[in-house]
Image (cartoon, rainbow, N blue to C red):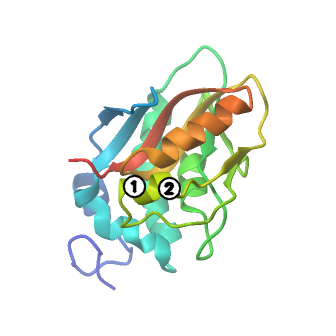
Amino acid sequence: MRCLVCQKLSFKLICTPCQKERLVPHLSRRELGCGLSVISFYKFSEIEFLLKTKYTKIGSSIFKILAKNSFEAFSKSFEFDSKIYALSVDDSVKNGFSHSAVLAKYAKGKAIEPCYSKLIAKNSIKYAGKNLEFRLSNPKGFEYSGKPNIDVILIDDTITTGTTLCEAQKAVERGKSRVLFALTLADAKE
């Protein structure tokens, strides 16, 4: 098989040199109108072809590689005085896996504990390729069923307009917990 990044022959979907040299995360931060700070590890254009694998059979393997290079490295260096929960945004299983649950798993660290199936969208509408007006007219209808009075980091794969993360933040706050910030693999705003 060939490495998806460099196209050289490889026993891995993404060869070790590409994982270490071409998929090096560089943090960026975006502040949303709802007061949420979002930290992203890549520009969307850098890994767009890899993000689209979430619709394929190899997606879980690709997301594990991306999560190890970004979320895992972040969580190893992140310190906080109390436990924080990495809450995957709508981690319902699609195409055999949940991309946000994979990311949350690799966010586990000294201060961060993954939390699954606690923030589910009741409206399964897809936002990919849709404009802001469409997103605002068709909310996901998140329901938070997690513990109250906890500190949360929202976890998702991509931030485009910020609509999903702001709606998720409101659902968590209605459940009496605090969203500290969000982590995403990629930021589509470049």
- Residue named by callout 1: 133
Q: Marks 1 and 2: in contact by CB < 8 Å?
A: yes
Circle 2 SS class: helix
Specify the amino acid type for callout 1: Glu
Q: Residue drawn 47% across and 70% down?
A: 54
Q: Give left or right: position of 153 versus 30.
A: right
Circle 1 SS class: helix
Q: Do we see residue 107 in this rendering?
A: no
Q: Residue drawn 26% across and 40% down?
A: 26
Between 2 and 49, the residue placed more toward the observer is: 49
Q: Quadrant of the N terminus?
A: bottom left
Q: Do we see residue 61 in this rendering?
A: yes
In the drawing, what numbered circle is on residue 137? 2
Between 13 and 187, the residue placed more toward the observer is: 187
Q: Give left or right: position of 62 versus 190.
A: right
User: Label 2, label 1: how many angstroms apart (C-alpha)?
Assistant: 6 Å
